[in-house]
Amino acid sequence: MAAGVRRWLAIPLVAMIAAMIYPLQALEAKNEKDGANSEMQAKTVVARVNGQPIYQDRLDPQVQAELHRFRKFDTQKPPEDLLKRLNEKALSRVIAVELLYQASRNLDIPDIDQRISKKMEEMKHRHSSGLKDMSDQEIRESIRRQIYVHEYLLANDLADPKIPEEEIKAYYEKNKQSFASSGSYRARHILRTVSPDAKPEEREEARRQIEEARRQILDGRPFAEVAKEYSQCNTASAGGDLGPREKGFMPPEFEKVAFSIEIGKLSDVIETKFGYHILEVMERTPEGTVPSYEDTRDFIAKFLQKERSREKIERHVQQLKEKAKIEVYLN
């Protein structure tokens, strides 16, 4: 199931719709190029869709996003074959969006101007720095395309399809083991930190402090109160509450106790690479526990809805391609 979820999060559907707001995203790409080169590429026609030109700068944001991780580790110029593949991939998505937009232009959206203005204000509020180099006309056109395509998808039952309940249940029954917990717990703890190069007397003092905290809790003082006074973890202000933790998140010495101690019982002192802890487990889910259908139903429904929408849009785009005149000039 995890692999399936990752797949639909990375599918062309999401990228296609995101590509509609290319003027906003293109700002980052423009800032990373030399002025003269940027001017040339921005005016380079890489394809035509029913006569409508597609310019290189509509591809650049997606290509730059793909290269972002590459640039973190290697400052050299990316290989030409990589750039070619990324540009081809981006062009395919942009062509798909252009086809959807062209198909949507016959829609009657009476309140289009009001919707554009509202969305424009939201974008300016959230992306003020990113929009400073864009004209209002560019922003409005970007938003117009987004609204038209969205309405077209809804009108043609290509977005948010309804998934029958029996299909959701069938998916759960077939895949419920993939939802099984790897083991989790909710605990609160108190930590006295010890640095790796701590002197013996520093370790001894940290140990004394954690044992004093433990003694006070055993004597009846509330755990949260003691945690706020003694803990050196950033959870101290929350009474030491770690919140839900999956297996493997905390040090093995800590988790050995967390998965074995009686619920609600205060632990002995535990030493880890961080220092000395005491903990109390409030809840625990054993490894292999399968959540109920009710707990996973909405997640599965959303997953299936996205998958169904992706399939329907891709089929629809293919039909539009078969009727369109598409010329590609990308080298």
Image (cartoon, rainbow, N blue to C red):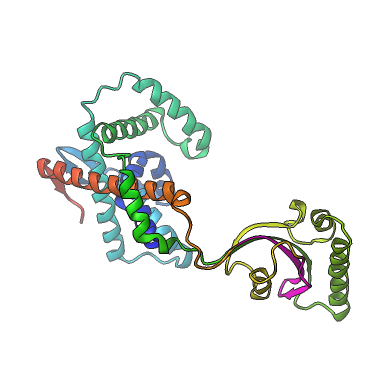
**Residue 310: x percent and y percent?**
28, 48
Extreme top residue here? 110
**Residue 65: x percent and y percent?**
40, 54
Left or right: 249 as drawn, with respect to 152:
right
**Residue 315: x percent and y percent?**
19, 46
Is residue 163 depicted above or below 182 in this figure?
A: above
Is residue 272 depicted above or below 280 in this figure?
A: below
Please check the rendered image and state whether residue 275 is part of the magenta-colored stretch, yes or no: yes
- Magenta segment, which residues? 266-284
Report the front residue among 9 and 166. 166
Left or right: 199 as drawn, with respect to 281:
right
Q: Quadrant of the C terminus?
A: bottom left
Identify the image quadrant of residue 198: bottom right
Q: How many marks?
A: 0
Report the front residue among 134 and 230. 230
| Residue ID at (77%, 56%) | 236
Would residue 37 be seen by someone viewing this image from the given angle?
no
Report the front residue among 186 and 11. 186
Report the front residue among 235 and 253. 253
Left or right: 328 as drawn, with respect to 155:
left
Is residue 144 depicted above or below 236 in this figure?
A: above
